[in-house]
Structures are given as structure tokens and as C-alpha cells.
Image: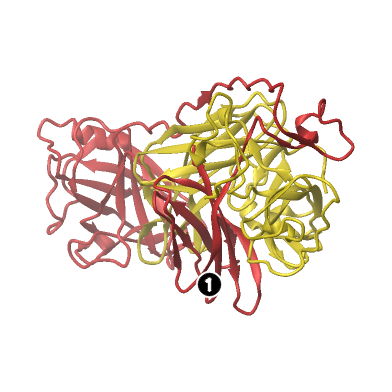
Chain colours: A red, B yellow
Amino acid sequence: MANEVMFPAGDEADNYFNSLFNNDGYFGMGDYSGTDTDGAIRFPNVTVSGSVVSAHIYLHVDDTTGSNSGDMDLRVHGIDEDNTALFTSNPFGRTQTTANVDWDLTRPDEGDFVSINVTSIVNEIISRGGWSSGNAMGFFIRERGTTGNNIWFSGGNQDVPPSITSCLVIKTAADPEFYPTPTSVSAPTIPTGSNYGLWISKPGFDVKTATEDQLLYDSDKNVLKIHDTGQEEITSKFTTITHDLGYIPMTLIFVTDTFQVDDTYRIPYVINTGSGFDEFYYYVNNSQIVVSTPGFVSGYVTYYIFVDEQP
Amino acid sequence: MSDYVFKISNKGDDVKTTADKDLFFNGDSPVLKSFKIADISMVCNGSGVGSATISHNLNYKPAYFIFLKGDTRDWFDADNNTYSNCFFPIGSLNNWYENQNIEYIQAISTDGQIDLSVNNASFANKTLNFRYILCVDPALSASGVSGLTASEYGLWISKKGKDVKTAEEYDLTFSSDYKALQFHNVHKFSEESITLPLNRASIDSQNQESGGYVDFNHNLGYQPFFIAYVQLGSTWYEMPYGNVDSSADPSESSLIGRSASGFCDSSKVRLFVSTRSKCYADDDDLDVSATYTQTTYKVKLIIFSLDLTGATYG
């Protein structure tokens, strides 16, 4: 989204069986054979200042083999410091923020990202007098009563990088207007018909009273007038056709695939091939037309270049 | 240029000095001639597979235009209305169409017929209705007998070097046997703008859409044939336009990230531009399909006098 910034995790730690495990790219949380394990994660270079609209921690789930179908009951606090240092020593005694959020995490699948809203925590840290944009921000994710579940999450990339890095996503401003106010262009006044001219009606209709739908030609109106037409052999994805008009003309383009079949398509054209989309398009400028025909081994571009200028 | 030629200028313009591009008719410049305008329906089966054949009896592949007829659906916060009896040019995604997946409709011109086909589950058990316009003018070079029979009376102008009495229909500049594609100059609308904001999906907003539109009111009271263009960068592309991005989602190999298309009803032609950015966590990283910076897209339009709901012909 436009106003969101993602900050990858730097390092992580846990107190698995009451011992510090850090700098290995992963951290565990939950209940390990009756022993509670807390986690901590740190995000360096968080370049925000002033309060944020929203903030979420996204943890990548690395290993769920120690969990069953029950929830994990966790609580998230921030580390109440201006610029949290690396977890080279046990961080779990550091002061934590007043703001906190409970996280009842339904057992995820390995490879998932799970997220928790930490907006109030982030705003408490940013509102500290010593916070500066670019400082590091840390969080504790503590055990809160989980029984029989433990999960390993990916940490950060400042030491031994995990396969996928967990992250902090902060939205600094409200969403932009994704649907701008539409424009309405007034209808023109259609000229009244002439009392003279050349009209041709369909057979059976009186040319003097025929409606638009009953006329084949009416000299009060313009026609598309062909300046040049022809074929160009396709030898690469892009086929260029030059013209001498000096302005951007209206055009009509067809492409023929002569490899095995002999099918002709009007373009522009996007087709779902079943394994993705192929886009056939063309663009026009003051001197040439460029036609894109992905996947064509052999074929032709048939072009009509009109005298009539694009509006 | 001939020393003698049949020309028609706009009212008030001197036909002898008016620039070619400003003439209403010029015997030196052939016009597109439609010999058949008609409707065809396609019933899709329970898997969304359907086909229809438009026979034409020409001995070559004709140029054609095909519009899908249907209702719009609610789309985008900008407009929660639905519009009935609208026409959508086929060729690419059209986000306003009730089913959206117009890019699944394939039209192929062959000797003897146009083959229409659909293969997408989202069309399951639906009946699709089309209006088509077949031209005398070929989509691949023609030679030999055209397969069309000319009237014994009328107004014909042949291309230079062709005997008007024996020329094949595709070698005629003009023939009163066929309907010419015509437009009032007042229905050429140039360069309206649509500004879309920066659009980049994130893990928090994994499928982010943005879109805007311009309504060109036309006062015709019927659904007109139209051709529209969109400017990307410095160049102009005909609509419907679809820009394919590689997908961030492993379940999709690609997606249409930016599209420009439109539809007409009896009071307006609506042209729109949309972007879609997707974010997905794959096995290696967080991937974003595309980032679209804030961009002002220009669109322009020409509305023809041809009534897409009018009587069939040919």
C-alpha cells in the first residue's frame, strides 16, 4: 500500500528452557514440555517519526512440529528504550512498555505469516523523548498460559539469516484516494442535417426520411479514410511499420499466426493461455506503428493507417 | 493524388484546399465498408466452455469488430450503479463487465467464418450476446473472387488502376452497397485525464486495486460504436489495453496489472484505467507484482454514428 513501510527484523532471542538462545535466525515461543518460553525480536533502522496510523508485526512461521491444534496465548510488549541494542546479551530484563496487546494465536501452518497489531506499542516508543527516526525498536512476545504448544518463528538477518525474515510494517499516513473523483464530459450538440448533400439509404428506405440506422452513407458526417494498408512479415516480437503523416493517425491492426494454423486476430488483444496471459498490443506515434506479438514464430501484421488523426 | 477526384468537405470548408485529414470524404482514400452487421449468441456449458461461428462466405479473412453486450456490475467505490444493455469491445479485461473476464473471449478470422470461443469457469451456464460488424476490407491480403455480389445499380468508386465495373469489392474505395463507418467531428473527444495514486500492495493489503474513469456523454440516445485510446508514457495505445505483470502469487503465473477499457450505453461512453498490485509471501520472500507510481493517464475517444442496437444488415 502506498503509505506503508516494511522493516525487516534484525535479530531475535528466546529463553528456551531458561537459557538464552540468540543470533541464530530463529526463536521459539510457547510451552515446551511444561516450560514457558518467551521470545524477543528487534527491528533496526525504523525510519519513522511522529505517531503512526498503524503498525503490525509479521512473523514467519518456521516450524510447528511442537504444536497441536490449540491456540498459543501470548502477550506483546515493546522494549521501552529509545534505541534498543542488539540481543547479544539476555534482553528479557529490559524495561517494557506500558502498552501491550494479548495475542491468541490459532495454530498456523508452516510457511504462513502471522500478524499482530502493535500500533499502541509503537506509538508509545516513538513518543519517548529520545526516539529518533532510524533507531531500533524491540518487542517481547511473552508466554501467557499456552499449554502443550510451541512454535519456531523466523527472526532477523543481522546475524545468521533465516530463510525468510519476519518484519514490522508501519503505515505512516492514511490511504490515498484510490478512486479519484470521476470526470464527466458534457455531450456535444449534434449538428443538424443539411438540406443538400449525398445520402445513400439501405434498399427499401426513402433516402429523404431515412434514420441514421437506415443510411449507408451521409455526407454530413466524416468517414475513416484509408491512407495506407498492407502487410509486414513478423520476424520478432515487435514489428515496426513506418508512416509519413507527421501526426498520430487512427489505425486498425490485425495479426495472423501462420505457424501450423492460419488464424487472424484483431488487436489489441489479451488472451489467457491457461498458463498465463499473452498481450498483443500496438502503439502509434508521429512516424510509426509498433506491434507486439508475443510467442509468434511466423506470421503477418496487417495494417490500416487512416488519414484521420487521433482525436 | 489524382487531378480529378470526388471529395466532400465539412460545411464551410473549401473542398479544393482542405487538408486530406479534414475532408469528410476523399475518393483517393478508401473507406472501411461493412457488409454485415448482426448479432450472435453463445451458450456456455457448465464448465464455462462455449463457441459460436459467424459464417461470411468470403474467400478471404475479413476485418471485423466485435462487441459483447451485457450489464455492468458494481465496481470500485467510485460508482455503485449498474447499467443495462451496455457494449464492451472484446480484446482484454473489462473491470466493469458483470463477469470481468472478457480476455477469455477469443475471436479468430478465418476463410469462410469468424470463430468465437470462450473457456473459463466464470462463464459457466451463461449466455453471451455479441454484436459484430464484418468489413469488406480484408484482415489479411485478399486476391481472387471476393464472394460478395454487387448490386446492378449504385455509386462505386474504385481504387486507382482498378476498373470500377469489374473490381472486386475489396478493391473499391467506396460502394453504395455497404455501410460506411461514419462519425460527426463533434464526437471526437481529446485528452481527458485520470490521475491514479501510487499503488503498491503490501503484506497488509495483499490485493490493492485503484481505478478512475471519465464519462463522455454523447446525446445520441443509443449505444454507439466507439474507438478509444490511452496514453502510457509518451505513446498512445488503442483500448482495450491490458498490461501483464508476473504474479507474486504462486497460484497465478501472471496477472493483468494495469488495464484500460470502456463501455457504452445510450447516454455515455465510460473509459477507465485501473491498476492492481498484489503481494504474496512465497517460499523465499515477500513479492510484489508491480508498483504503480502516481500517474496521470490521458484518454481520448471517437464515437461513431453506428448504432450497436440498430437493425441488422447484410
**Residue positioned 62% across, 26% down in the render:** B218
Q: Nearer the viewer, residue A148 or A62?
A: A62
> Where in the figure is residue A165, as x and y percent of width and height?
30, 60
Q: Is residue A261 above or below residue A45?
A: below
Image quarter of the N terminus of chain A: top left
> Where in the figure is residue B46, as x and y percent of width and height?
79, 58
Residue linked to disc 1: A296
> Where in the figure is residue A45, as x and y percent of width and height?
17, 48
The residue most toward the right is A204
When asked about the image quadrant of residue A164, the answer is bottom left
Q: Nearer the viewer, residue A282 or B259?
A: A282
Report whether residue B207 is seen.
no
Q: Nearer the viewer, residue A174 or B40?
A: B40
Dot 1 falls on a residue whose secondary structure is loop
Q: Is residue A277 left or right of residue A30?
A: right
When asked about the image quadrant of residue A214, the answer is top right
Q: Nearer the viewer, residue B136 or A285?
A: B136
Report whether residue B259 is seen.
yes
**Residue positioned 41% across, 45% down in the render:** A247
Residue type beneath disc 1: Phe
Q: Is residue B50 left or right of residue A221?
A: right
